Amino acid sequence: MTRTVLQHRLATLVTSDDGMSTVEYAVGTVAAAAFAALLYAIVSGGEVTTALTGIVQRALSTTF
């Protein structure tokens, strides 16, 4: 291989932008945690808990 080809490949490896950078990873992690907290707040609310409990009780009391 010539020196130019090696330099080009090395430059491609060094400047490659594959995957998430650290900042993008941190923002994505914070967004996922915020979404999880929102879902937890919704599911742990009184109405949702009552509805889910009713669904489970009906499912368990069904005879086959």
Image: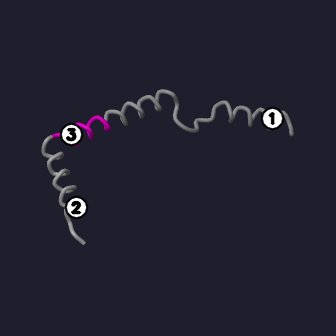
Point 19% across, 62% down: residue = 61
Q: Which of marks 3 and 1 is nearer the N terminus?
A: 1
Q: In which quarter of the image is residue 47?
A: top left
Judge left or right: residue 53 versus residue 11.
left
Between residue 1 and residue 47, name the one nearer to us.
Answer: 47
Mark 3, mark 1: which one is toward the viewer? 3
Kindly identify the amino acid type of the residue bearing the numbered disc 3.
Answer: Ser
Q: Earlier in the sequence, mark 1 or mark 2?
A: 1
Q: At 81% from the left edge and 35% from the top edge, which residue is drawn?
A: 4
Q: Which residue is drawn at 86% across and 40% down?
A: 1
Residue 41's label in the rendered image is: none
Residue 17 located left or right of residue 61: right
* Residue 4 image label: 1
Residue position marked by numbered label 2 in the rendering: 59
Reading the image, the residue beneath label 3 is 44
Which secondary structure class fits the magenta region best? helix
> Which contiguous range is marked in magenta?
35-45
Which color scheme does this rendered protein use?
one colour
The secondary structure type at the circle numbered 3 is loop
Q: The residue tagged with tag 1: helix, strand or loop? A: helix
Amino acid tagged 1? Thr
